[in-house]
Image: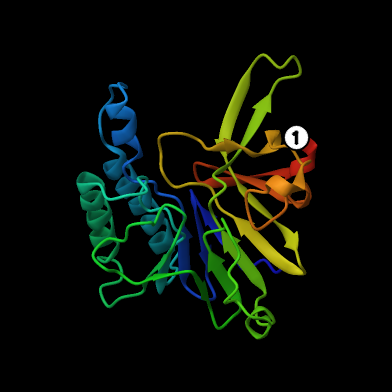
Amino acid sequence: MKDNFRIFGKSLFFPDDGILVIGDLQLGYEEQLFNSGMAFPLNQLEQSINDFQKIIDKLREDNLVLKNIVLLGDLKHHFGYNKSESKAVREFLSFLERFLPGGGIILIRGNHEKFLIDNRDYKDYYLTNSGILFLHGHKWFDSIDKKLLSKVKSVVIAHLHPAIMISDSAGVKKEKFKCFLIGEFLNKGWFIIPSFFPLIEGSCINNYPVKNPSKEFSVIPRAKLQSFSVFVPSDDKVLLFGKLRKFS
């Protein structure tokens, strides 16, 4: 796979296209936990904004030009309408528009976007002229015809909330880290990005069973993920952990 991407925190950046992509903000998740009886400060929106600002600062530090921001679905957590959640989504989008005042924010519809906010234009997928296809990752779309697919060189998805569980030899001490999964599938390069929301690390991808293909959970079969490489962002570095099969 051509090395034409950069990882900044929980985001992926394509320098040739000037595209920054994040997924699964799940704004409103903390409110659901709070309403279920868990008491903690409601600062998910603030944390998400702070995390994104750090990414922007890094892009500027490296003199990288930002042309588009792609949000890979599930901006919101509730499947229906929630007033405070909708307000949080509007505030986050307004924050992003500071960096691209002339437009350039691309919204991909996720499985949580049952109710859209402010009648914004959500796309099922977005394909760049350079051949990068962005979609949420919970399903494929019949409208992506063969002629269109022939132009696709790379696919970027979210939805899985991938995280890797690392343990000592005795299995006593365990730590979980958000991670990127990058590999080849259908003769194309694939990028699976972690969830952007800060409250939990995500789903332990190395514990997903590879059997029972009738219960797939993404556009990529579970067994195929075993050959993907695991990248873990850590402060200002990105660590390559090797192939996923090494941890399964």
Give SS at disc 1.
Answer: helix
Picture coordinates of residue 208, whole percent (x, y) = 69, 37
Q: Residue at x 75, y 35 (%)?
A: 247
The picture quadrant where one finds residue 244 is top right
Please name whichever residue, 75 or 100, is drawn nearer the observer in this view of the structure: 75
Picture coordinates of residue 28, whole percent (x, y) = 31, 42
Q: Sort mark 1 into few (<14), some (14-19) or many (20+) by Cα contacts within 10 Å.
A: some
Q: Is residue 23 left or right of residue 98?
A: right
Q: Residue at x 67, y 74 (%)?
A: 153
Quadrant where the C terminus sits is top right
Q: Is residue 54 left or right of residue 207?
A: left
In this rendering, is residue 68 above or below 157? below
Please name whichever residue, 80 or 5, is drawn nearer the observer in this view of the structure: 80
Q: Is residue 238 left or right of residue 246?
A: left
Q: Which residue is mark 1?
A: 247
Q: Residue at x 69, y 33 (%)?
A: 207
The picture quadrant where one finds residue 37 is top left
In this rendering, is residue 99 above or below 86? below
Picture coordinates of residue 43, whole percent (x, y) = 27, 36
Give the farthest residue toward the bottom: 147
